[in-house]
Image (tube, grey):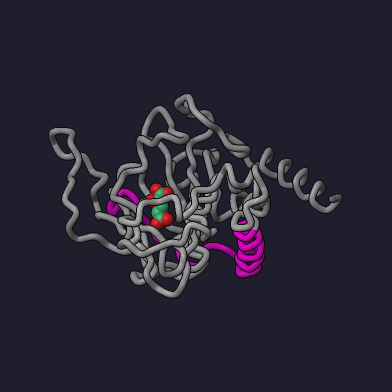
Amino acid sequence: MDASLDSLRHDGFVIVPDAVPQELLASLDLEINAALARAAEGRDQALLADCVFERDLPAAKRGERVVPAECGDVFILGNLAEHVPLVLQVLLLAGVQHLARTLLETDAAVPHFVNLTQKSARTGSGISWHRDYPNRYICPVEPVMIRLMLCLDGMGEDTGATQFIRGSHHSMPDGSLPDERSGAVPAVCGPGALVAIHPLVLHGGAPNASAMRRRNIVMQWGPAGAALQPGPRELITGLLPSSLETLWRKQHTERVAS
Ligand SMILES: O=C(O)CCC(=O)C(=O)O
């Protein structure tokens, strides 16, 4: 069996180091910084509609550290392919496509959504313990999905690395799920690593009190054709690689022309 599938089945998460070419990582860094700067300016209404700002989250999530009302730091930038078209190149990477298909054990995988989750330097909020399935955003009917996080800055314990309860995706004999919070494992990794998350594994993470920000591109994938619950959809929801490629060419052409 593929080693990554083996780890996912056993632990509920997998870390794949150096999964994205340096050049793409550097270009993403620039384009994402530009989108975050536009969000902080507060004039692009379409972008603002897809942002959750740090200032809107309860102080308890960041150890009561104060975020001024005028602070423009983004916690989540949703619908990312709309605002940072280069993210389509991440969805199209052979390594990302292969990992999604392998971990889903399918011949054809499609993205459901892509966002940027940022824990800002010093005041980035923590993320409560949760399982990704079910969720209230874009959710398949069955718990057959995978989240892949591309860690742009890497993750350290000091920057609020995602933590996992290893094996917590396994059902107990009575059908319930283990629920203890002890023995959390931080997914420490370098920039360019992919972290894959089983839909039922318990995970969360501490606030970021360090001087470094921590940004992850979070993608949810499922088998092509698998039914989704009613709800919102993104530009890229359900697109096979050929359609992602067409979308990339269209967006790229429009950008060059403008
Ligand atoms: O960014 C992170 O640390 C984790 C994100 C996460 O938990 C999720 O997308 O479910």
Quadrant housing residue 41: bottom right
> Which residue does the image show at 50% across and 68% down from the upper left?
153
Quadrant housing residue 14: bottom left
Q: Is residue 216 above or below residue 199?
A: below
- Residue 207: where, in percent of width, then height? 35, 62
> Which residue does the image show at 64% across and 64% down from the upper left?
24
- In this view of the protein, can residue 221 be seen by the observer? yes
> Which residue does the image show at 45% across and 55% down from the upper left?
55
- Of residue 203 and residue 158, the one placed in the foreground of this image is 158
Q: Is residue 183 above or below residue 199?
A: below
> Which residue does the image show at 61% across and 54% down from the upper left?
39
Residue at the front extreme of this rendering = 69
- Of residue 46 and residue 26, the one placed in the foreground of this image is 46
Q: Is residue 202 above or below residue 190?
A: above
**In this rendering, position of residue 253 left or right of residue 235:** right
Q: Is 15 inside the magenta-drawn segment?
A: yes
**In this rendering, position of residue 167 left or right of residue 27:** left
Residue at the bottom extreme of this rendering = 211
- Residue 96: where, in percent of width, then height? 54, 53
Main SS of the magenta part reads helix
Quadrant housing residue 125: bottom left
- Residue 22: where, in percent of width, then height? 61, 69
**In this rendering, position of residue 146 left or right of residue 37:** left
- Of residue 249 and residue 35, the one placed in the foreground of this image is 35
Residue at the left extreme of this rendering = 174
Range shown magenta: 8-37
- In this view of the protein, can residue 1 be seen by the observer? no
- Residue 150: where, in percent of width, then height? 50, 58
Q: Is 83 inside the magenta-drawn segment?
A: no
